[in-house]
Amino acid sequence: MAFILHTDRLHIRPWEEADRPVLERMVRDPEMMRFITRGRTWSDEEVDELLARQARHLRNHGICFGAVVLTDSSEVIGMVGLQPHDDGQFELGWWIWKAHWGRGYASEAATAFVRHAREVMGLARLVAVIDPPNTASIKVAEKLGMRFECIKSARETIAKREDMPIAYYGMAL
């Protein structure tokens, strides 16, 4: 069964085909991509790969980076979730559409996934990968209880990202 997580203002669920325009709007906006690909926007093929990868994670692990939906309006405003990362660990990630920045949605949704990772999945640890200049995401990580561990190249991880330095955060659950 697919996961659905609820918070006071949000629900997070797997991506649906009807959500694709929201994802395309995000990945085609250079400001939204500045901490993902240094502003390079994505092609249709990259969108396809992200959605296919999340579908695989859902099939294989029962979890993925899911669509964040405002409960009161049903608007999809971003993605938050868990996906397998290096050495059998799971990565916690968040990405909220810029019109909704500063309202605490990333922290709220990520908190629900921390609880899910601990109580449902029985995970002992989570990691997050953050572009070092992304102070807003660093604040979210720290609010969740994550701590800075090191800077490494994105190529040192399984992430398919440009060769850029990333801040690696982690937390025990």
Image: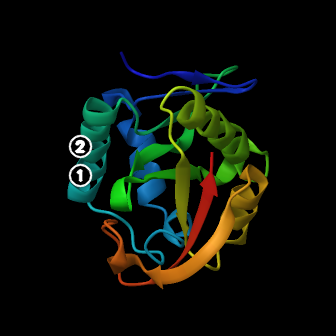
Is residue 98 depicted above or below 153 in this figure?
Answer: above
Q: Position of residue 96 (x, y in %)?
A: 60, 49
Q: Position of residue 63 (x, y in %)?
A: 40, 34
Check disc 1 and report the residue beneath it.
49
Which dot marks residue 102? none
Asked if labels 2 and 1 touch by Cβ distance under 8 angstroms, the answer is yes
Is residue 33 depicted above or below 62 in this figure?
Answer: below
Q: Position of residue 89 (x, y in %)?
A: 42, 53
Tell me how far mark 1 sits from mark 2, CA to CA.
Answer: 5 Å
Location of the N terminus (image quadrant): top left
Question: In the image, what residue occupies the spot 68% across and 39% down?
Answer: 111
Going by the image, does 74 lie left or right of 49? right
Q: Tell me if mark 1 has few (under 14), some (14-19) or many (20+) residues whose alpha carbon lies within 10 angstroms of its own.
A: few
Location of the C terminus (image quadrant): top right
**Amino acid beneath label 1:** Glu
Residue 80 in view: yes
**Amino acid beneath label 2:** Ala
Going by the image, does 140 lie left or right of 87? right
> Which of the 4 image quadrants contains residue 164?
bottom left
Question: In the image, what residue occupies the spot 68% across and 59% down?
Answer: 146
Check disc 2 and report the residue beneath it.
52
Q: Could you say which is closer to the camera, residue 82 or residue 119?
A: 119
Question: In the image, what residue occupies the spot 34% across and 66% down?
Answer: 159
